[in-house]
Amino acid sequence: MLKASTVLAGTLAAAIASSAAAEGELNIYSSRHYDTDEQLYSDFEEATGITINRIEGNADELIARMKAEGENSPADILITVDTSRLTRAKNAGVLQSIDSDVLEARVPAYLQDEDNQWFGFSQRSRIIFYDKAEVANPPLTYLDLADPAYKGMVCIRSSKNTYNQTLLASIVTHHGAEQAKQWAEGVVANMARDPQGGDTDQMRGIVSGECDIAVANTYYFARSIRKNVKGISENRDQIGWLFPSQNTQGAHMNLSGGGVAVHAPNKQNAIAFLEYLASDSAQAYFSAGNDEYPAVPGIGLAPSIAALGHFKPDDVNLSEVAKNLPEAQKIFNDVGWK
């Protein structure tokens, strides 16, 4: 197992050493629910001597809690999944802008908030899966999912799902609201069933024969390569996959990221932790431990995620996508996407 203590940058160590904050503590509010993240926390504690205290919960509940706590909030950092939730945190006023040469240098600009209130640290691509025996010509782009040729074939999650909200917001960004609405109407018409369950359930729909095409994030499928996932691992040969829109904008990427709380009592420790998440070891662990794509370029991929193949990711600025989230929700409502 890679250890953060062996590769922490000198800039990170200096930031910790010069911290004038409450010594030795860091309070993290996190909606990431992965046991594998324990290694990230323990490595940071071992490397720095800083004790991490965590509160875990639903992202919206944590944001509401931070807002209610106000200046008395103990939160130093909010960590959550997807641009939509990071944007809700920013709009709620619970994050602050920070200056960090380390983060500016290591995290690509399109994976940062335009005001430096949040930074992305890992990614998942939202791609198309299909039944290899039933679908000879799978949709090659996101827009193709609305083609009437796929009527009654598509399984996809509900409009309440943050991954779908950001996907639709990216379609608005690339193609405009009118075409995005036409797309959403087409997808609803092509659904094999009403939206239900999580991403793994969409792929299980292929295995059961309930649908022939599904939309899901890569790490759910990659996990079935690394370890047993009931209903998927034993039937993996039935499922084909492709990264959409390779001849245009590239495959849509969902983000996991974090920002410093607006009233952080341990601000310097918080910045140091975010810088640690951008270190080589932490980035490699996002891939090895949770089958995600690193945010920092040049980091090797775990075998489970490398097995999915090379692809062109969409490098649209996620701050611009975030601005279209309200329009995306309006479209969902207008077309009756449950």
Image: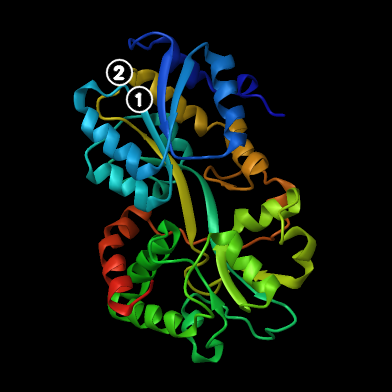
Amino acid of disc 1 = Asp
Residue at point 34%, 77% (across, down): 336
- For label 1, the SS is loop
Q: Which residue is mark 1?
A: 76
Is residue 62 depicted above or below 74 in this figure?
Answer: below
Residue 61 % position (x, y): 33, 41
Choose the circle earlier in sequence order: 1 or 2.
1
Q: Can residue 116 be seen here?
A: no
Q: Quadrant of residue 239?
A: bottom right
In this rendered view, identify the residue nearer to me: 243 or 166: 166
> Alpha-carbon neighbours of circle 2 within 10 Å: few (<14), some, or many (≥20)?
many
Q: Quadrant of residue 311?
A: bottom right
Residue at point 42%, 48% (across, down): 111
Q: Can residue 23 be seen here?
A: yes
- For label 2, the SS is loop
Q: Which residue is mark 2?
A: 265
> Alpha-carbon neighbours of circle 1 within 10 Å: few (<14), some, or many (≥20)?
many
Mark 1–mark 2 CB contact (< 8 Å)? yes
Residue 247 % position (x, y): 54, 75
Q: Residue furthest bottom?
A: 149
Q: Quadrant of the N terminus?
A: top right
Q: CA distance from mark 1 to mark 2?
A: 6 Å
Q: Quadrant of the C terminus?
A: bottom left
Residue 89 % position (x, y): 29, 42
Amino acid of disc 2 = Pro
Is residue 312 depicted above or below 145 in this figure?
Answer: above
